[in-house]
Image: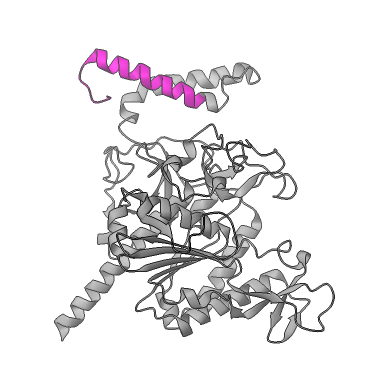
Amino acid sequence: MCNSSSPSAAEVSDAVNFGDFYKRAKRFRLFEPSVGVLGVAVCAVIFCLFLLDYRTATKGLTRFPSQNERLLWLRIDGDGGGGRGGGGGEEKKIDFLSSGGGCDVFDGDWVWDERYPLYQSKDCRFLDEGFRCSENGRPDFFYAKWRWQPRSCNLPRFDAKIMLEKLRNKRIVFAGDSIGRNQWESLLCMLSSAVPNNYSIYEVNGNPITKHKGFLIFKFIDYNCTVEYYRAPFLVLQSRAPPNSPPRVKTTLKLDQMDWTSSKWKDADVLVFNTGHWWNYEKTVRGGCYFQEGSNVEMGMSVDSAYEKALGTVFEWINRKVNTTKTQVFFRTYAPVHFRGGDWRSGGTCHLETLPDLGSSLVPAHTWNKYNIFSRVLSSHSNVSDSKSLGVLNITHMTSRRKDGHSSLYYLGPKVGPAPLHRQDCSHWCLPGVPDAWNELLYALVLKREMTRKSNSSSFHAQV
């Protein structure tokens, strides 16, 4: 490879890798006739830079900085690990698990990593057809090659066997909307990659892994653990309209009551919440779903106000019903959508996106509104004892830069082919892909919390 001392071997390597470079560049459409002279000139500049510094660059990884920069700059990690060892003049990063809590793992960059993805969709039988983008005809696979790299520390590399051992005789529960299901299926694939006999993993009620209402529980029999998903897009209870309601009220969201499946969540060992994608006018008031407090239907309440009250109910339920000395509770923040030129109902698109945003992302304003509401509610409950035990998977900012990772046209299955251009999915995510990074962060936080508990327990016994 690039470390060979033989000139002939290096020349061969350069030729092979330039072929790979050409293929990648071609995806950027620099060679199409419509670009003309400008495309050729840009290509020539890139080619010259590539040749001048190729052998140095191939020792590291290309990194996209998070600052609002308009140009792509190569940053070299001398260890070839994308910042995992620190080299080439960069300050060596600390290991997250050994750090004293001074590292914000949600502040960082997406870096290209040839070791990714962690699994292939064709090897995982626990995926909805709609998430199998490569099998459904997506021509590029760039979206699966990016790893999240915190700015100040290194994450532990995901180890499915270690995670399964941590989950032995335990339950991990995901409760939320279909983006939560996206993350749940990602974890199923990540964990099952370490199980030689996939048929030792099964749904306890015999249900197929297809989109439906209700819940699914997959058991890993070798570890006696379950990985569970409960469909609860609002987290609070949706029910029939009370008697004597106005005719336009078809259903209500009871903002002071949790979803009916919440009794099944509370005793989990790891509990991961998410909500937000259904908290909009189209999914609520437009369809006749209004907001209810006590016996009163609040006809004039805004969606944002209802969302804030519902989140307050969730935090209060955690404080009252969940034993946080046993259960690790995490709330994953809102995952942005990336429709351009419309939304899911009006022809919005994302199918031409093949790379992350280089700087700040241009996601819809409501993304940050949802995020800010959550932050405000979390802050208002920060003095509640059990709310302090709530872990936050703060993925909104990092995910906002991944406009390239959505299912877009490739969610209908290989027999049907790509969807019509005006019916794209720029909300859900291809797997393998972005939700794997959320689960890598979850893995790191689970390990960190366990280490902290053991350390605190050791200190207590030492004092006694």
Is residue 303 positioned above or below 257 on the image? above
Image point 45% across, 78% down: which residue? 387
Q: Is residue 295 above or below residue 393?
A: below
Question: Is 430 covered by the magenta stretch?
Answer: no
Q: Is residue 202 left or right of residue 284?
A: left
Q: Quadrant of residue 82?
A: top left
Q: What's the magenta bit mostly, secondary-structure-wise?
A: helix
Disc tally is 0
Q: What colour-coding does the image apply?
A: one colour
Query: Horizontal placement of 67 versus 159: left or right?
Result: right
Picture coordinates of residue 344 (x, y %)?
69, 50
- Residue at (37%, 50%) from the top-left corner? 198
Residue 7 is a magenta residue: yes
- Above or below residue 398? Residue 28 is above
Visible residue check, residue 101: no
The residue nearer to you, when weighing 83 against 202, is 202
Residue 325 in the image, given as x and y percentages of width and height: 34, 79
Quadrant where the N terminus is found in the figure: top left
Q: Residue furthest top?
A: 8
> Toward which corner of the image does residue 202 lie, by quadrant?
bottom left
Is residue 393 shown to the viewer in this render? yes
In percent of width and height, residue 111 lies at: 41, 42
The quadrant of the picture occupied by the C terminus is bottom left
Q: What residue occupies the far right of the structure in this picture?
A: 247
Q: Residue at x 47, y 54 (%)?
A: 185
- The magenta span reads 1-25
Q: Residue at x 73, y 72 (%)?
A: 302
Residue 440 location (% of width, % of height): 38, 54
Residue 388, image quadrant:
bottom left
Q: Nearer the viewer, residue 89 or 279?
A: 279
